[in-house]
Structure formats: structure tokens, C-alpha cells
Image: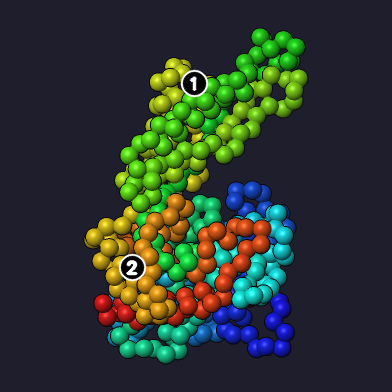
Amino acid sequence: MTGGAYALDAVTRLLADLVSIPSVNPMGRPLEGDSYLEGRMSDYLSGWFHDLGVQVERRTIAPGRDNVLARYEAPDSRRTLLFDAHQDTVPVEGMIINPFRPDVEGGRLYGRGSCDIKGGMAAMLLAFARLVKERPKGSASVLMACTVDEEFTHVGSSDLARYPHGAALAIVAEPTRLDLIDRHKGAVRWKIVAKGVACHSSTPDRGRNAIYRMAEVVSLLARYADELARSTPDPVLGPPTLSIGRIEGGQSVNIVPDRCEVEIDRRVIPGEVLAECPARVTAYLSERLGDISDLEFEPPWVKMPSLSASEEGSGRWLEPVRSAIETATGRRPEVGGVPFGTDAGPLGQSGLPALVFGPGDIAQAHTEDEWVELDQVRAAVDAYYQIALDLGRA
Ligand SMILES: [Zn+2]
């Protein structure tokens, strides 16, 4: 931590603490080393809420992975808001800075998670602390939720969606450059496996080459992706997409491979039924290939709902939230959509209106030298506080 003799402000201090605690999401890979999972972050957060004098609830979602929840009851509360920020970060391989040493330089704080989304979490926590300490009249109550596993399968926010939160609206922290996001794409990811028969490569006719079979599948899926790209787009988010992100098969050049698999990323737009997307792909392949009994379609490991805006849903909260942000920051936020998924997907799907708002730019998230502008984090503290204040009355 640099910063010389200057006393660090509360934002920098808290964000530096959060960044220095590794909470890396293994993203489905085997655990190695001690920087993985959210456990230490959950311990820190529990202690932080405890020091603030509020009750903490830890809900174990998976081994070593707890959602941490704390509630602020406003004195004359008419309404509860759910504040959501995720504890996990993406992995640190390939970073050109020390991921867990929060360096401050030129108004930026560097480190893994600084932008996505420990900056937003620090801002939400400090706004929450200010509510607890000042107990302003007329504000909304706030349930502050720090979720696990946002970056991979969203099990944390899926649990939160089922939790008796009693909230009228969720504000989800993600790097939006202090603009407001009311819609985003969802995603479903699954594997297709081609099964063949292995044999010595000197007599390939005795086997069945799984890579050749997968090549047929891949070229059909490329066509399918083209068709999707030309289908009716969402007016804000564009068309749905499909991309094959990984392929793996074969053991050795002198063996006819008996297995080849691909991983598929299908982005869905509001209005599409997530659960139907893999079955559509299966049907598309079956119509063109005939017998597909040598293909295995594994159940999806990511089912991330899209977020859509509607008049009855987040629509009615848009204007009060927008003007609260403008009051706090002096800048009227743009309203729009983003292609990436967030914790707001599962919350929105459960019927809870959700808006995404936070400091930092998604362009700096997940990068080799991830950073966030501290002034944006400071502005976000005021904005989250003002949202709670105004929405108690709205
Ligand atoms: Zn994030």
C-alpha cells in the first residue's frame, strides 16, 4: 500500500482492505493454493458489520462459501431496499501487478477486484454504515447482501432471490461508470461430447474418429450462430448469440480419438426462455445429422437469467433512482443495457425489480492491471446513500 504520510480516507482504507483479501473464484477448476473462495472475505465482512453494531447472518451456500447479510432498519421505514455486491473476483493468472497489493496512484486504486466489484462493495458498505450511524428520517431500510460465486454460477444471488428479503427493489453493484443498467443478457453454458471408437492410427478404418464427428457439429453450430445473429434483436441489447469457447479431444497423434468435447456459451436476450436454448441446439443438430446417439449433451452448469425492464418492474423505480444519483453526484446517469450477466438476473427472475449501478468501468474489470478511480467510488457512496434516503419517501 503506498500513500506516504497522508492519512487515507475511509473509502481508500476500506477498499484497500477488501482488495488485499484474496477471494478468487476457481471458476470450476480444482482448488490450489490459499487465494481461492470467499471464506476470508466473509470473515472480514462479518467482523466489519459486527464492529458497526449490526447483526450479521451468514448463509452457507457451498463449502467455504457464505453469503453475508446485514440489515439496517430505518426508524420509520416504509420500504426495504436490497443492496447486492459480490465477494468473489476472477482468477489472477496473467496479471502484471501484484493482485492483492492495493497500490494507489494517480487517483486510482490497483488490484484484483478493485473494479469488479470491491470498489462498488466498499461504496455500498460505507453508505450502509452512514445510514446506521445517522439514522436519517424517512429513509428506506436496507438489507446489505454480500454474495458468493457471481463470476461463475451465481449460486449466491440465486439463494438470495429465495431469501425472505422483503425488498421492493434491488440495487446491484457492478462497474457501470455510475450509469444505470436496467437490462442485460443472460447466459447458458453447457458441453457437447462426441463419442467415437479408439484404435491405432495406422488402421483408422477400425475406429470412429470423435474429432471428425465434432468437426461436423462445430460447423453446424457456426451456421446456427450466424442464424441467431440475424434473428430478431432486443432493441437495446442486440441479437442473441452463440459461441464455442473451448474444444478438447484426443490423446495422442497415433490414436484415433474416442472423445471430443466442446463448451458452448449461449447468450440470451429478454423474452427468450433460457431452459429451452440447449434443447433447440440439440434439435438443430438432430435435424441435420440424423442419428445423434453418439453425441452427449451435458446439463448446463451456468443458467444465468437475463434482466429485463418493465413498467411494473424496475420501470417505476427508474426515475426516483436516477434523480437520487443526480442529487448525489451532480450528473444525471444514462440508462441502458449491457451484454454481460450480473446478480440482478436471478433476482429479477424471482420477481424482484433490480437495477445495476456502480463505480468503475467494465473495461477495467478482469484485466491484467485492474484498477478503479477512487473519485467514482466516493461518488458511489453518496449515490447509494441518497438512493436509500429518497426511496424511503418515493
Ligand atoms: Zn462483477
Name the image quarter holding the N terminus: bottom right
Which residue matches tag 1? 293
User: Dot 1: what SS?
Assistant: loop
Which residue matches tag 2? 169
For the residues labelled 1 and 2, say whether their Cβ atoms are less than 8 Å apart: no
Residue 390: x and y in percent read 32, 80
Residue 271: x and y in percent read 31, 46
- Counting every numbered tag in the picture gives 2
| Residue 275 visible at all | yes
User: What kind of colouring is applied to the model shown?
Assistant: rainbow
Q: Residue at x 34, y 71 (%)?
A: 322
Q: Looking at the image, is mark 1 or mark 2 earlier in the sequence?
A: 2
Q: Residues within 10 Å of mark 1 (few under 14, many from 20)?
A: few
State which quadrant residue 104 falls in: bottom right
State which quadrant residue 144 falls in: bottom left
Q: Is residue 68 left or right of residue 40?
A: left
Q: Amino acid at mark 2?
A: Leu
Name the image quarter holding the C terminus: bottom left
Q: Residue at x 51, y 35 (%)?
A: 298
User: Dot 2: what SS?
Assistant: strand
> Which residue ends up furthest to the left in the rendered image?
312
